[in-house]
Image (cartoon, rainbow, N blue to C red):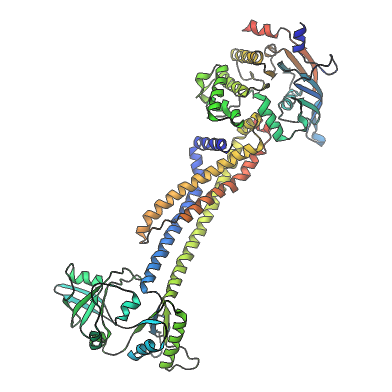
Amino acid sequence: MLGTTLILAVREIRRHLLRSFLTILGIVIGVSAVVTMVTLGKGATAAVQTQIASLGSNLLQVRPGQGFGRGGGGPQPPDFKEEDVQAIRDQIGGVTAVAPQAQSTGMAVRNAANWSTTINGTTNDYFIAQQWQLSTGRIFTRAEEQAGKAVCIIGSTVQANLFRREDPIGQRFRIRDLSCEVIGTLATRGQGGFGNDQDDVVIMPIKTVQRRFTGNRDIRAIMVAVDPAYDTATVQQSTQQLLRERRRITGDKEDDFNIFDTKQISDTLSGTTTILTQIVTAVAAISLLVGGIGIMNIMLVSVTERTREIGIRLAIGAVAREVLMQFLVEAVALACLGGLIGLLIGLIASLSLAPMMQVPFLFDPRINLIAFAISALIGVVFGYFPARRAASLNPIDALRHE
Amino acid sequence: MAADSVRVAVSAAGSGAPMADPLIRLRGVTKTFGSGGAMFQALKGVDLDIARGDFVAVMGPSGSGKSTTMNILGCLDVPTSGHFLFHGHHVEALDRDQRALLRRRYLGFVFQGFNLLARTTALENVELPLLYRGEDRKTRREVGMAALEKVGLAQWWDHTPAELSGGQQQRVAIARAIVTQPDVLLADEPTGNLDTERSIEIMELLTGLNRQSGITVLMVTHEPDMAAYARTVVHFRDGLVERVDANHYAGETAERVG
């Protein structure tokens, strides 16, 4: 019975190709919009999460000042000292690495090549905290760290600009007025969480940077890696307590430093993409609703137009349920067809838009299934009313129609 | 002659001796349309028996109640009061779907306006009743082609109504009506839209089906020429059966014209 009805429905759709196409246009647009948006949204979320992960996981960033950067107005809160780093390392439990950072910028020059880059003074703990592997060479020796030797480990962007395809290990280049030896190269990381190029960096022992570039013993930031077995929030609290004591902040005075959990950034950013996806999905859902009303419209017109046909079918011996099923199946078949075309367009659109938006294409079978199921459901819901009207026609009146 | 009189077993109520249950029996059938001031009584107590295998022409002026009677006989409508016995079923007590199943099983319809599905081939049109009977594709095709063969249109099977003449369309409609081998064929002015030559073709086709397949034919017509093909002519007037004529020369008439 269903097979027969399906044959009838397909015949009817084929007989009115243009009208059928116009009928399903709303659903096509709705489904393709939903699929494209959710697929791209998922890609964007994944991209953001990769970038966040590249900041390091279970990582606390300790900086002077309130919030990001240094707060405006008032005396600038002091930077950290070597002793603060040592105190965190000694007194806070569950810490796997504590990496102080002193930053500067400078022009790196080698032969005819020159490249302006970031100089990051730190310790070997930095590589642990960042979970950043070297691709060639070695990390600093204890002696190099303590003496502030002119050695460096370079990021792949710097390597590419200064050395092209040469092996940089053991070679020297000049940065500002310091000639330094390359002892290692970093694995490529790509774009950071804020669109910055993480590979555009020269890493040196912190003593070297302090002595040769910043001219003081200040530490701009401390990176604290937390043992995954420990609760990051607890470690954050005890670090805060420790630093308040060390910086003599008493009572209910506010901190003059901030401790940032990278997970917070991750949550904030993925929250943003989720909200965006939800908004676009809501818009697409409205378009699906409009599409459904379009189907109902056309089906109602179709019932009126085919009153005589319905009369013939009833006279021949179709029972009401069969006429209802015919129109319902027709509506559902139309809606499903619209859904399928929508899926196809959505797939093509997200495949071609993903590279343009620099997000990965992630095929999500779930959203495709859901979108298709919803279009079928729209067919049932909006097809039922016209179908019931067709089924309730009186055969005599229907035959006399027109 | 005795055999003839049994076959022409139509009697107005009260006249003639009771016989074996006829195929169709109407008793005191009334039909009222509308209500209050706009109320109109189309049938005022119709009694009619039609025997299996008969060829009946229904005649009468407009508003005489013949179309209403045909609708009731076609199980498309129910009487307001009275009884309609068909095949042992009290049709007046059946619901919509039960009547639809009765039509599907025992009835075939031919209309004045042909009423074929547009943009649908002759064969698909003829197959339609088989579709509702749940026949498979192969059976539909075979039986459908056989029916088209009977009306002499087998070679036109893949033509749509727009590509067929009026006479051909009506023959497709007849093929559709007989494809399920119904007991009764109801024809509502089947020649009303056709010229004389095509009308004669259609009437011969109906006569042949009635004789060879034993299908009971009920036909509404305005034209005495067409009624002449019938063995029984029922005259309606003012919502009542006025008289029933037996036409003993029906067969000969057909032969003479053919």
Tell me what residue is drawn at x 71 percent, y 26 percent.
Answer: B74
The quadrant the C terminus of chain B occupies is top right
Outermost residue to the front:
A229
Image quadrant for the N terminus of chain B?
top right
Residue B218 in picture, x, y percent from top left:
70, 19
Observer-nearest of B170 and A376: A376
Q: Residue A212: where, in percent of width, then height?
A: 23, 86
Q: Locate residue A195: give its quadrant.
A: bottom left
Quadrant in the rendering for residue A187: bottom left
Q: Residue furthest left?
A: A111
Vertical position of residue A77 compared to residue B188: above or below: below
Name the side, left or right, on which A186 lies relative to A247.
left
**Res. A401 visible in picture:** no
| Nearer to the camera, A228 or A362 | A228
Q: Is residue A146 left or right of residue A253?
A: left
Q: Nearer the viewer, residue B116 or A252?
A: A252
Q: In this rendering, does residue A306 appear at all?
A: yes
- Residue B45, image quadrant: top right
